Image (spheres, helix red, strand yellow):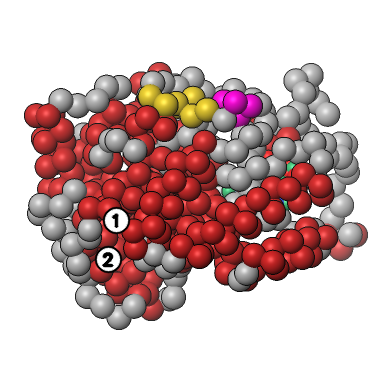
Amino acid sequence: MNTNTPYTSGLENVIAAQTKLSRVNGQLGELVIAGYPVEEIALNASFEEMVYLLWNGCLPNQAALAQFSQSLKERSALPNETISLLETAVAKNATPMSALRMAAGTLDLDSNNVDRLDIGKRLVARFATVVAAYWRLKNGHTPIDPHSKLDHAANFLYMLTGDVPSDAKSRALETYLNTVVDHGLNASTFTARVIIATQSDLVSAITGAVGALKGPLHGGAPGPALQLVFDIGQADRAESFLRQKLEGGERLMGFGHRVYKVRDPRAEILAKAAKSLYEQDGDLALYRLAQTVEETAVSLLAEYKPGRNLQTNVEFYTALLLHGLGLDSDLFPAVFAMSRVAGWIAHCFEQMDNGRLIRPKSAYIGEEGLIWQPINAR
Ligand code: ACO
């Protein structure tokens, strides 16, 4: 190695940014978002309030909220170019996350627009419209225009189904969106900060972040987590099924976290929100099965990976909640992105205001002093 600075695999425990946006304590299982414990804010705020908080550092008063919500609504319709691109993505059978990554690049085509707040609002408002429109196109339906009266979360469910959702469903989605909106320097947020730190543009930063979120180790876990519960099917099969997976060296999706060494506090919020949704209008037996799967998985992970403290992460109950809302599991990562985009943008603003170019070093472990060989001598 040609450096005296120690190499840290996966940048674990490396502090690479200062932020006022969120604080994660993985030992105590705490998440604070812009000063508010996640348990306090996620269940009470509207998504619009949450976005305003992250972008302004304080909650809005009534007039500011009304103005902010209206400005998001005004930007929620998609440019024609985005619709054309989504039609092409359907023809190529793209996943919703791939379609969102492609579409993200078309959400602000005005190269003279330097108003970062305007671009941020376009991205947040239009992410929901893209996801709903793509799902409808993919399933042979015409996209539905945004509703002029509904708030962000309710509007997404409306654009997806054509029905104005119940208050319970809108609240459940809003709680989910609030819970996952920001989470320290996770992989996709780091990606966005690295891109914007080069003085690139917001759309590029957000497009890169979608790519990072798409992976199964980050935002792609809830679909497989739900499948795990379905594959197990009944409580008395949980132990043998999970043991077989662990003995085959497989990872259990929805468990383990780089930072949390106790149960992810977001799992608690989403488990409660999912329970209340399933109690009102859902398959309570599925919820109870998921609880058994969770308990069994945590206890087997302690047995197979002692000392690793592998606990339930946010994705396990994300899967249950979004399934309870009637969403197909192929949509889960894109719905995650619909929320996290607001956090990515907040981090970009912070990086633009206070940050420097992000440029770590690598430790060279290759050969030295090789002699050039002409091609016919190799
Ligand atoms: N199931 C089984 N074993 C696991 C799991 C799991 N879910 N998670 C970690 N391990 C094991 C690893 O195999 C490894 O074991 P070993 O040392 O015997 O080889 C050990 O625990 C440490 O694993 P790392 O990959 O080094 O841990 P890292 O901190 O890099 O991983 C991660 C964190 C990627 C989330 C991991 O726990 C995982 O793959 N979980 C499943 C995927 C998932 O649920 N992702 C969503 C995360 S939440 C989010 O991003 C929003």
Main SS, magenta region, reads loop
Residue 14 position in % (x across, y down): 64, 25
Q: Which residue is mark 1?
A: 169
Q: Which residues are magenta?
A: 24-28
What is the quadrant of the N terminus in the image? top right
Q: Residues within 10 Å of mark 1 (few under 14, many from 20)?
A: many
Q: State the residue in front, 209 or 204.
A: 209
Instruction: Tell me the SS state at disc 1.
Output: helix
- Residue at (77%, 65%) from the top-left corner? 240
- Asked if residue 228 is positioned above or below residue 300 in the image, the reply reads below
Badge 1 amino acid: Lys
Q: Is residue 99 above or below residue 367?
A: below
Q: Is residue 139 visible?
A: yes
Q: Secondary structure at mark 2?
A: helix
Left or right: 174 in relation to 319: left
If the image is split into quadrants, where does the C terminus sit?
A: bottom right
Q: Nearer the viewer, residue 22 or 247?
A: 247
Compute the Cα span from label 2 to label 1. Answer: 13 Å
Percent from the top left, x then y, of residue 366? 83, 40
> Considering depth in this image, is 358 or 266 the residue closer to the camera?
266
Up the image or down, 154 lies above or below 188; here it is below
Which amino acid type is marked by label 2? Leu
Mark number displayed over residue 117:
none
Residue 160 numbered mark, or none: 2
At which x and y percent is residue 113? 20, 40
Residue 103 seen in this snapshot: no
Judge whether 257 appears above or below 173 on screen: above
Question: Magenta stretch: residue 260 in it?
Answer: no
Residue 155 found in image quarter: bottom left
Give the mark nearest the N terminus, 2 or 1: 2
